[in-house]
Image (cartoon, rainbow, N blue to C red):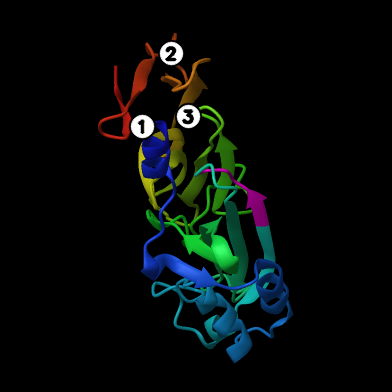
Amino acid sequence: MIAAVALLAAFICPGDQKLRLDLKEWKAALLKAEPGSDEQKYAVRALRFQSIPGDAGPEADCADKPVIEGVDVFEANLTGEKDKLVQVRARACKGDQENETQSLRIADLVPLAEGQLCKLEGADLSVDQRASDRPCENPGKLPRTLSLVELTQKGRKVVQTRDQAGSCDDPGGRTSSVKTVIYEAQGWQLKKIFESPLYDSTTQAQGRQLVASWKLSFGKTVPKEISVQRCVEGASKCEEPDVFVYSKPGGKYVPR
């Protein structure tokens, strides 16, 4: 019985998600390739990433020669199978105020037998963002940053993102926002299990500024509760926190 349960719990990768490549060689080839070259495009397709920049990228000629600024490989352990989170950092049209676009291509890869890899499907962590779509206050260097957190299962991690956006050139007002999203590996897919704003600031044309922030805190035992408390600048005190718990049947966080 124990052996049967263990077999059922083993990671299984669908055939159409299997890749055959050496991750170190792939990284070296991508970093070496000239911007916009066939070699660069081939390396991007080798991990079945969307083109850089994506379909919503600028139509300017400079978009055809994106520069790969770095490749990060993190020990992720989302599946318990020694998987790795791969992040490609790229930029097109650098210095062009209208067209500059940052691109992140992100995938979780699970090692398989005979040198193969399984790319988790489901939610796509990749993102493209124009340089103009940045917070007016304390913008980060990347449109999305990643953290690996033990949250729902002992010994396994989830991916927590921090995403920024904003508008600083609108004559009607300025906006800055930051949010967090949490993704969990469920089987051979990534699934979004929680989302919350972290910061929101709006400055109206008249000069009035409205600022709200949200503080997240995690419980101590797995699966951990998530507490979210909203504070409005100028208010006498913060609101009572909302508490979310992990629902195993639904595989996501729900209000307690």
**Picture layout, residue 44 above or below residue 134:** below
Which sits earlier in the primary sequence, circle 1 or circle 3?
Answer: 1
- Which residue type carries mark 2? Cys
Q: CA distance from mark 1 to mark 3?
A: 23 Å
Of marks 1 and 3, the one in the foreground: 1
Q: Residue at x 44, y 9 (%)?
A: 237
For disc 2, the marked residue is 238
- Which residue type carries mark 3? Gln
Give how far across and how far down residue 33 sits, in percent.
69, 83
Quarter of the C terminus within the rendering: top left
**Picture layout, residue 217 above or below residue 51:** above
Give how far across and how far down residue 66 sits, in percent.
60, 78
Which sits earlier in the primary sequence, circle 1 or circle 2?
Answer: 1
Region rendered in magenta: 73-78
Q: CA distance from mark 1 to mark 2?
A: 52 Å
For disc 1, the marked residue is 1
For disc 3, the marked residue is 153
Residue 39 located left or right of residue 134: right
- The image quarter containing residue 203 is top left
Which sits earlier in the primary sequence, circle 3 or circle 2?
Answer: 3
The answer to which of 44 and 110 lies nearer the viewer is 110
- The image quarter containing residue 245 is top left
